[in-house]
Image (cartoon, rainbow, N blue to C red):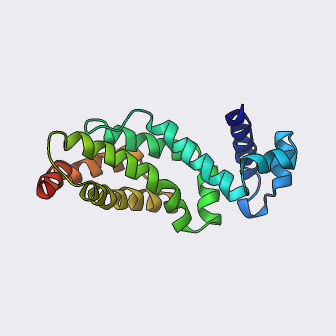
Amino acid sequence: MSNVTKRALEQSLKNLLLKKPLTKITIGDITEDCGINRMTFYYHFKDIYDLVEWACLEDARRALDEKKTYDTWQQGLLQIFEAVQENKPFILNVYRCVHREQVEKYLQPLVDQLLLDVIDEEASGMTLRDEDKQFIAKVYAYIFIGVMLDWIKNDMRENPQEIVSRLGKLLQGSVTAAISRFRL
């Protein structure tokens, strides 16, 4: 039942963000729109930014689903772009009201996990230190997140399919090459 309430709060926040900026929305506005009391909100979230973070992570997780393999990472990344685009008013409002670093903080663990899953699959049968896997994932995550943040900053004008396709061309074979360089 807990996730039902969280999703209802998320939807109320997204509804309100269509009308006004995040900085003008109060917990009272969200609870009134949702039809719950303030204590119920605080049972689930410590503040509005906690709700924003949860909503961002949930949207991204749903977008990724099972697209975390070497053969599907591009599809997984495209689905993250598409999920962000589907929530354009929400994402742009959040991006403009919180620091870029905060949005990056929301995306980092998700992209790291996508890349770690790809690296684990590619390194299967090889001996590779966990810290080296994490380092490789972090480097590629900076690329993906930086590209995505610039795309958001530019009002999501560029076609996500083109961005992911160009990233695929740029990075083709480079993950495998990086893994082989760190192989013990």
User: Residue 8: x percent and y percent?
Assistant: 74, 38
Which residue is rendered at x = 73% and y = 56% of the image? Answer: 46
The residue positioned 51% from the left and 44% from the top of the image is: 60
Which one is nearer the viewer's eye here, 183 or 25?
A: 183
User: In the rendered view, would you say 18 is above or below 11?
Assistant: below
Quadrant assignment for the C terminus: bottom left
6, above or below 146, in the image? above
Dividing the picture into quadrants, the one containing residue 183 is: bottom left
**Residue found 67% across the figure and 58% down from its top:** 49
**Would residue 104 be found to the left or right of residue 162 on screen?**
right
Instruction: Say which of 46 and 114 sits in front.
Output: 46
Q: Residue sitting at 33 percent across and 59 percent down?
A: 138
Total residue callouts: 0
Residue 109: x and y in percent read: 45, 53
- Residue 144 vs 37, above or below: the answer is below
Of the 4 image quadrants, the one containing the N terminus is top right
Residue 173 image point, x, y percent: 16, 48
**Direction from residue 136 to residue 85 in the image, left or right:** right
Horizontal placement of 165 versus 172: left or right?
right
Asked if residue 155 can be seen in this view, the reply is no
Left or right of 12, for residue 148? left
Q: Is residue 79 visible?
A: yes
Q: Quadrant of residue 161?
A: top left
**As rendered, which of 50 and 86 lies closer to the eye?**
50
Residue 176 drawn at (x, y percent): 16, 48
